[in-house]
Image (cartoon, rainbow, N blue to C red):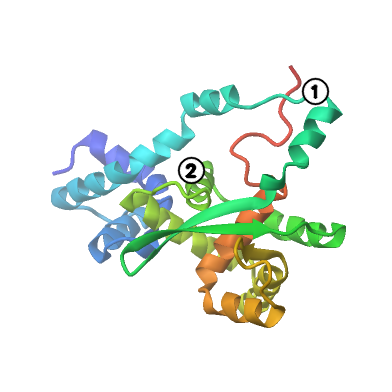
Amino acid sequence: MIDAKDQYALQNVFPEECKRLPLGYLEEHEKILAEKCINGEEFTQTELEELQVLLDKYREYFNKYDSVELEENIDANIKVIQSSTELLNLLDDPNRYRFDMHVKIHGQVYRLEFRLKPLSDNEYMDLLDAQTRVFRDLSKSEKMVYSKATNGVPLSPEEEKMQQSIQDKIVEKLGDVDKNNDVITTFLINHVELVGDEDLNKSARKKFWKTIDIGTRVLIYNRCKEIVRIDEGLEVDLFPDVR
């Protein structure tokens, strides 16, 4: 028999936590437990204990990313710019458009070195519109996991599943997958290259990017939006209070 305290958590706390799980990437029995909880179905004591174990695995990341301490740590690392000279020196840095990405192929981890070419005003505005649609509804914990993945920071097994779920959300947010697949691929062909491929012709670049899977293309596309300072995905307020 489930005691009153656990019954309260099962009805009022656990369902919201279960909604934050990467349901599509859980083990089948884990997914069944989470969906039962979300739907308010009856639990046996054994099922409740199994659900608590599942939530405990992910609660570490939810709490870590949503804590006040994290907010304070982020705030402490924000650098203040007070002059146009400082800002222009930062924006003129040639490494601003360089980024690396870790991929695993046949069990081996590789580091890919990419370069983003500068964008026109119209191309920038197109990216801004897509960025707003993609990131508006992601939770803080999802943005943090996404940021770690795009910056090449190793993920735990639980974070890997969360990242896969986030990728699915991003593709879904982009709307018409076939249409946006073309938009993303065209952008990458025209604006992103491996650092050793600067002499590659457009036909070869097109062949390369069409070989890369859509999930990886979406991650790289969104990393480019971070690089050009489209900050809908910031872990802090875009416009903080004046101090």
What amino acid is found at the position of numbered circle 2 in the picture?
Ser
Identify the mark at residue 9; answer none if there is no mark: none
Q: Is residue 211 found left or right of 12 in the rendered image?
A: right
Residue drawn at point x = 39 percent, y = 45 percent? 17
Q: Is residue 76 found left or right of 10 in the rendered image?
A: right
* Camera sees residue 134: no
Does residue 89 lie above or below 209 as drawn?
A: above
What amino acid is found at the position of numbered circle 1 in the picture?
Gln
Identify the image quadrant of the C terminus.
top right
Identify the mark at residue 141; answer none if there is no mark: 2
Whole-percent x, y for residue 20 in the image: 43, 50
Q: Quadrant of residue 133?
A: bottom right
Whole-percent x, y for residue 84 in the image: 85, 29
Whole-percent x, y for residue 104 in the image: 38, 63
Q: Is residue 153 found left or right of 227 in the rendered image?
A: left
Residue drawn at point x = 23 percent, y = 62 percent? 29
Is disc 1 placed on a helix, strand or loop? Answer: loop
* Camera sees residue 79: yes
Residue linked to disc 1: 82
